[in-house]
Image (spheres, rainbow, N blue to C red):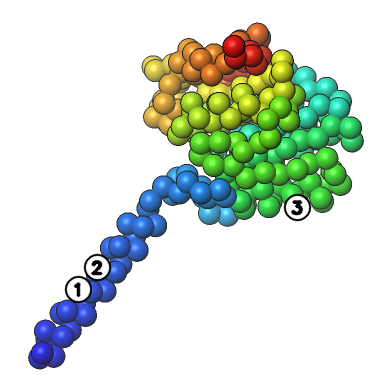
Amino acid sequence: MNFKLLLRTTLNLLLCFAAATLAFSQQPATAKGQPPKQNAPSTIEQLTARYEKAGREAYDRRQDIFKAAAVKPGAVVADIGAGTGLFTMMFAEAVGPKGKVIAVEIEKRLTEHITRRAKEAGLANVETALCTERSVELAAGCADVVFLCDVYHHFNHAKDSMASIHRALRRGGELVLVEFKRIPGKTKEWIVKHVRAGQEVFTAEIEAAGFKKVEEKDFMDENYFVRFRKVERK
Ligand SMILES: C[S@@+](CC[C@H](N)C(=O)[O-])C[C@H]1O[C@@H](n2cnc3c(N)ncnc32)[C@H](O)[C@@H]1O
């Protein structure tokens, strides 16, 4: 083999390797602790700046959302897709030492962050749990309340995730949903693109998963607040 041929072969091999590495890194992750999408910001600081910033309605109205959720002392709250722990910390104060908050996340770095954050805040009633894209991976009947804030539209396998949430709630348990309003022509364009369906579709999906809508509070511009109750399957 002459030198030019050897050089070309080596370059081709390197290019194939680079392409294969790139393709593999773009595969959606499904294992516990892995983010489902690739374009997520890579640091906790960036995520905190995204989820806990003025201008994000769920952050600006967090006290109103918290009050509307009305979790009681002693309750077990599962904060699914807890993000950086914004609501986890608030619920942990509210449920007190006789209750607890289980912060469930698909990203391991976020459960680790929430564990550190709870420890620094002296909140001993916060647990964290890793989930998968298809299941919240909680024990049957372990929660009184499941809280989903700007998470439902992230469910790539909503039917499976909702079946696992139904299992995780105790008899008569409640699901509190905060989700983006999606009204084409009215809602911001990025939300219309980012969120696959509006309130009616998501409500129908959740009811089909074994829940009954029991309350709705309209106090936000960009998000809706709905409470569902678990219905027992026959
Ligand atoms: C927009 S953030 C909301 C965070 C938090 N609930 C809040 O309101 O500040 C969505 C979160 O859902 C998580 N997530 C995405 N898919 C999920 C899934 N299938 N199960 C649980 N969490 C998921 C993401 O990692 C992200 O932290």
Pointer 2 with pointer 1, Cβ within 8 A: yes
| Disc 3, SS | helix
Q: Is mark 1 within 8 Å of ligand 1?
A: no
Q: Which corner quadrant holds the N terminus?
A: bottom left
**Of the pair 32 and 61, the residue shown nearer to us:** 32
| Disc 1, SS | helix
The quadrant of the rendered image in which ligand 1 is seen is top right
Q: Nearer the viewer, mark 3 or mark 2?
A: 2
Residue bearing mark 1: 12
Density class for disc 2 (Cα within 10 Å; few <14, some 14-19, many ≥20) is few
Residue 211 versus residue 45 in the image, above or below = above
Q: Is residue 56 left or right of residue 94?
A: left
Residue 172 versus residue 135 in the image, above or below = above
Q: Is residue 126 left or right of residue 184?
A: right
* Mark sitting on residue 116: 3
Residue plotted at (68% across, 35% down): 139
Query: Alpha carbon of mark 1 to alpha carbon of mark 3: how far?
Result: 47 Å
- Residue at far front of view: 234
**Of the pair 209 and 70, the residue shown nearer to us:** 209
In percent of width and height, residue 42 lies at: 53, 54
Residue plotted at (15% across, 79% down): 8
Q: Which amino acid lies under the numbered mark 2 shown in the image of this protein? A: Cys
Q: In the rendered structure, which disc, 3 or 2, sits on the residue that comes first in sequence?
A: 2
